[in-house]
Amino acid sequence: MSKKNCKNILGIETSCDDTAIGIVTSEKKILSNIVINQNSNLTKYGGIIPEIAARDHLSNIDYAIHGALDEADLELQDMDLITATGGPGLIGGVIVGTVFAKSLAMSLDRPYVAVNHLEGHALTARLTDNVKYPYLLLLVSGGHTQIIAVLEYGKYVRLSSTLDDAAGETFDKAAKILDIGFPGGPMIEKMAIDGDHKSFDLPKPMYNSKNPNFSFSGLKTAFNQTVTRNKLNKTVVKDLCASIQKSISDCLVDRTKFAISKFKEMIVNETKIKLVVAGGVASNLFIREELKKLCLETDVLFFAPPLSLCTDNGAMIAWAGYEKYNREGETNLDFKPRPRWPLDPEAHYINPIQLKIGKNGVKA
Ligand code: KG4
Ligand code: ZN
């Protein structure tokens, strides 16, 4: 398959709890984007159980592919390129998506591309808003909180990462403490609308620090203690939600401000710096507004993909897979799913966030 003839791209995402399949065209049209989530199952356990999530992907993936083809009004034979998340993520789910994609590619005789999940989030704004390289990326999801200089395809410099929990994980844990459901981010955002964020004085770890990284574990502990000390009713819960959302948002804005100044030093030839936000937490409207204000203050262009493309989806994998195919060609069918797959493997040595990296290397 020549790169020019590659029109319809199938993207499969199974690295966490959503079984997602999207079809996009090389002209950046999203023909379908089906996401089957496991939220009702996850509410039962208060989080993701990797083994259960993997089994659910196995039963959902058939429905997802039929749904995606129906929505696009296409047949499997119309797919020109088969892409799937190859990591990082929960390995059981990544295996399900990878094996499914390789089998499709073999039976249809089409090229297969293994995609880095983080690259899927990182390149979404190129699909939705035609954003040109280079840009600064704030990637905030359930598993990752990073700021990355995206210089061109495949050239990523991580400027900041979390020393402990991710921002989405903090939302999820706060919601679990309040027992208001999973995933926590959307629940907290909803409750926070009528809450007063000045009601509780929660910490903002790393705020104003010269160390570029994030940290959220102290905030989570302080939140837990605050909840334990207070008698909960609907008003108090709303105020607690507004307060933790504000603390997380202030940390994200402050660290992004710091990274913008570093990025301006790196990209001296650009007339206008661009900030792209991506990942599940980027669908939070309060946080988007605060980031927009920061961009106005710092003379930076702001891009945020539509809400449905911030959380995990197959369309972003299809697009990133297409960009990868154009630069690097197809992936060998002996590709092994990768639980660890950093976008910037050098970052650990320049800005270490873990003391030990383990025998399998840096996680993400
Ligand atoms: O990108 P994503 O779908 O999956 C990962 O790659 O992790 O992100 C899921 C995370 C969850 O932690 C969820 O609570 C958070 O994104 N999230 C939100 C919102 N929607 C999803 N956090 C804050 N506000 C939201 N509206
Ligand atoms: Zn994600």
Image (cartoon, rainbow, N blue to C red):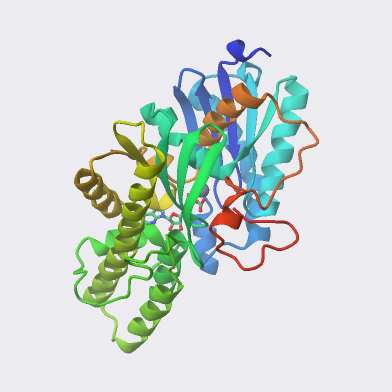
Residue toward you, 161 or 67:
161
Residue toward you, 282 or 251:
251
Residue 36 makes an appearance in the image: no
What residue lies at 43% left-to-right and 30% top-to-bottom?
A: 133
Is 316 placed above or below 217 here? above
Is 333 placed above or below 27 here? below
Q: Where does the image place residue 56, in percent across and percent down from the top left?
A: 63, 51
Q: Quadrant of residue 131?
A: top left
Q: Where does the image place residue 89, in percent across and percent down from the top left?
A: 62, 52
Q: Is residue 315 left or right of residue 83?
A: left
Q: Residue furthest bottom?
A: 229
Q: Quadrant of the N terminus?
A: top right
Residue toward you, 275 or 41:
275
Residue toward you, 359 or 77:
359
Q: Is residue 156 left or right of residue 265?
A: right
Q: Residue furthest right?
A: 334
Total marks in image: 0
What residue lies at 54% left-to-right and 48% top-to-bottom?
A: 18
Residue 305 makes an appearance in the image: yes
Q: Where does the image place residue 160, in percent across and percent down from the top left?
A: 46, 55
Q: Where does the image place residue 151, in percent across and percent down from the top left?
A: 48, 35
What residue lies at 33% left-to-right and 70% top-to-bottom?
A: 204
What residue lies at 57% left-to-right and 26% top-to-bottom?
A: 322
Q: Is residue 354 left or right of residue 305?
A: right
